[in-house]
Image (cartoon, rainbow, N blue to C red):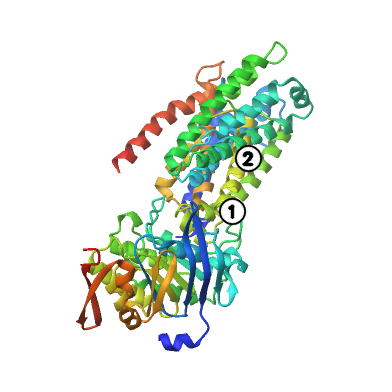
């Protein structure tokens, strides 16, 4: 069986086809549904100033691609966090990473001085504070668990759940205390419920570049995560500096989550469901797991975002609501499967 | 083998090794030499510090003081990856967190020895073509694992697991194997077979094996080191150990010896206290 990037070639081909199909399908979805013929018209290299063409090119396509990237980031981050926590139930949303990122984003948007800076440099402040929030929250969970001498991974997860609840409450308080007429609560709320932003093409380029860089680094963690899964003693004997590696992997996964939260708010369960599905089909080795989870996460969120845009026109359904509707039952399914084993 | 090996300088040497855990001295000046190609059994009562000594040598415990040398060089002078390629460790309890197949385990074991960041960028030097496959297929045949490669580790029997773990530790060809009670949870037949496998695989690997079963130690080890209260009390050939009477002193029980086709065997007799 030939493999490319650790993924069996046939799987990779199917995944790439699915990526293209899902992007094409999501382009048809929206308050105004389009047929495939209309979509193909767009591919003709004739310059058109038709308003619908401009709408598709300047609004819908960037939105669809952003949804794909956010899903990819969450899928890959989920795979890494599950590797770090050595528990298939770890999810950036459940363990406090995404709530931490959202708290950082809230600060960036609502604290007056920062908000001013935000207006100056929107590309930087939001992701940076999101990242600091994400990294601080996750590292906080790992440190607290260590202080409390929590040794099992289930206890670690519970510490994450507590952290997520705490940060969520803190953020709600900040929203109530800091928001005024000048700053729209609506913007902040969209982070809470999850919803894909539509970037300009130039911004999209930066985001895509960041995604590729982060994924390339993430791929390098794969072997260390494999080794970590053999237990601390064996991992140390095999040359892995366990503590340092965990901090580094957390740093990287937090960066993935921060970027995802910056452009999509807190979207739960993608990081949980996707690595699970991939593990069922491709096995638990992290090199194929991380990359495939990124692709599958991208496909899933592209489709769900399309639905979110088109189910209740002209309103948009918050994306986090859709992922929770699918993800929560799936979570129960995983629990049931595990207890049966 | 022992006498021939003893003429050379030791592969590994521990001197005045001390380890304190929770304010209690776990290792209290361990001194031990391990020679290339020998199977050195480490025996002693529970809590004597056998596992801790193994963990210091395997790079798992790092807070020790004293001196550990590998081929005359301080262990702390080795980069983690190089140390990892030379010294492999088999834990007493092993349960991977993911549902790995035997082939997965071997593949991870093959890449033992990462750089300090745990990235896969630095790989162990690749031997000349054909060498790795020949070596590992020989190992897999010796351990009768060729038919089990696609099986999940969790679905293996105890004896199969012991063999898979042994292969995982040996596949990158370390020069020293540390095994912490590799046969503790096996039935007598599998204990015997696993010790035979161990013996068969260790032609050019030295091994330090913690054993609870004194008779298996007597039967399979080249030398035996007896440990008590954080020190090596006696280290010598089987005859030395039997003649010294140290086992009675250390274990607090008198042993009767019986002749067997492969040497003398021990059976605990009277309790010193009773």
Return the residue nearer the eye: A120 or B60.
B60
Quarter of the figure with the N terminus of chain B: bottom left
Q: Quadrant of residue A169?
A: top right
Give the mark nearest the N terminus, 2 or 1.
Answer: 1
Q: Which residue is mark 1?
A: A220
Is B136 left, or right, of A194 in this rendering?
left
**As rendered, which of A325 and B193 lies closer to the eye?**
B193
Q: Crowding at label 2, few (<14), some or many (≥20) Cα neighbours within 10 Å?
A: many
Q: Indicate the quadrant containing the C terminus of chain B: top left, top right, bottom left or bottom right.
A: bottom left
Q: Place residue A155 in its image quadrant.
A: top left
Say above or below: A156 vs B189.
Answer: above
Looking at the picture, how far across and down is residue A154, in whole percent? 42, 39
Label 2 element class: helix
Return the residue found at the far front: B273
Residue A258 % position (x, y): 62, 35
Chain designation of label 1: A
- What residue do we see at 29% from left, 40% from top? A340
Tag 1: Cα neighbours inside 10 Å, few (<14), some, or many (≥20)? Answer: some
Q: Is residue A128 visible?
A: yes
In this rendering, position of residue B198 left or right of residue A96: left
The circle on residue A255 is 2
Residue B153 vertical placement versus A176 (above, below): below
Return the x and y of residue B202 as percentages of the image width and height. 40, 77
User: Which residue is at the front of the view, A7 or A112?
Assistant: A112
Residue at disc 1, secondary structure: helix
Chain for numbered disc 2: A
Q: CA distance from mark 2 to mark 1?
A: 15 Å
- Residue at x 30% of width, y 79% of height: B242
Residue B249 location (% of width, % of height):
32, 70
Picture disc at residue B247 = none
């Amino acid at each position: 069986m030939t493999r490319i990037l650790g993924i069996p070639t046939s799987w990779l081909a199917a995944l790439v086809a699915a990526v293209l199909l899902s992007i094409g399908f999501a382009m048809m979805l929206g308050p105004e549904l389009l047929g495939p013929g209309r979509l193909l018209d767009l591919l003709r290299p004739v310059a058109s100033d038709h308003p619908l063409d401009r709408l598709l090119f300047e609004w819908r396509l960037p939105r669809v691609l952003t949804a794909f990237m956010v899903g990819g980031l969450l899928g890959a981050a989920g795979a890494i966090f599950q590797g770090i926590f050595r528990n298939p139930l770890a999810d950036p949303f459940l363990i406090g990473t995404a709530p931490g990122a959202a708290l950082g984003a809230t600060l960036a948007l609502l604290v007056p001085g920062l908000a001013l800076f935000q207006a100056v440099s929107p590309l930087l402040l939001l992701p940076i504070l999101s990242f600091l929030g994400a990294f601080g929250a996750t590292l906080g969970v790992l440190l607290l668990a260590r202080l409390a001498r929590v040794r099992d991974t289930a206890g670690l997860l519970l510490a994450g759940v507590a952290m997520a609840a705490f940060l969520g409450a803190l953020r709600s308080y900040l929203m109530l205390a800091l928001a005024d007429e000048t700053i729209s609560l609506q913007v902040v709320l969209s982070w809470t419920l999850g919803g894909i932003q539509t970037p300009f093409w130039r911004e999209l380029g930066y985001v895509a570049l960041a995604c590729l860089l982060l994924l390339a680094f993430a791929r390098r963690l794969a072997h260390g995560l494999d080794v970590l899964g053999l237990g601390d003693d064996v991992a140390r004997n095999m040359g892995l500096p366990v503590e340092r590696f965990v901090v580094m992997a957390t740093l990287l996964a937090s960066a993935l989550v921060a970027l995802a939260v910056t452009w999509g708010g807190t979207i739960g369960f993608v990081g949980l469901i996707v690595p699970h599905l991939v593990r069922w089909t491709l096995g638990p080795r992290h090199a194929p797991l991380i990359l495939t989870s990124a692709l599958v996460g991208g496909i899933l969120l592209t489709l769900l975002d399309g639905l979110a845009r088109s189910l209740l026109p002209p309103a948009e359904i918050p994306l986090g609501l859709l992922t929770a509707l699918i993800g929560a039952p799936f979570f129960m399914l995983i629990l049931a499967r595990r207890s049966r084993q | 083998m022992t006498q021939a090996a003893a003429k050379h300088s030791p592969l590994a040497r521990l001197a005045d090794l001390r380890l304190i855990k929770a304010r209690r001295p776990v290792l209290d000046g361990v001194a031990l030499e391990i020679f290339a190609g020998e199977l050195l059994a480490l025996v002693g009562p529970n809590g004597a510090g056998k596992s801790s000594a193994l963990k210091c040598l395997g790079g798992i415990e790092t807070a020790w003081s004293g001196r550990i040398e590998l081929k005359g060089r301080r262990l702390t002078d080795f980069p983690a990856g190089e140390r990892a390629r030379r010294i492999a460790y088999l834990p007493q309890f092993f349960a991977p967190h993911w549902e790995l197949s035997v082939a997965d385990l071997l593949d991870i074991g093959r890449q033992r020895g990462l750089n300090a960041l745990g990235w896969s960028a630095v790989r162990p030097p690749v031997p000349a073509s054909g060498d790795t496959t020949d070596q590992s297929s020989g190992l897999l045949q010796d351990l009768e694992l060729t038919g089990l490669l696609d099986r999940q580790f969790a679905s293996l029997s105890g004896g199969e697991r012991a063999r898979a773990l042994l292969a995982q530790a040996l596949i990158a060809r370390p020069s020293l194997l540390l095994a912490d009670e590799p046969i503790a949870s096996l039935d007598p037949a599998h204990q015997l077979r696993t010790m035979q496998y161990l013996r068969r695989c260790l032609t050019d690997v030295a091994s330090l094996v913690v054993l609870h079963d004194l008779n298996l130690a007597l039967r399979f080890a080249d030398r035996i080191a007896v440990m008590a209260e954080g020190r090596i009390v006696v280290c010598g050939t089987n005859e030395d150990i039997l003649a010294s009477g140290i086992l009675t002193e250390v274990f607090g029980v008198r042993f009767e010896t019986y002749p067997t086709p492969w040497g003398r065997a021990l059976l605990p007799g009277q309790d010193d206290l009773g």
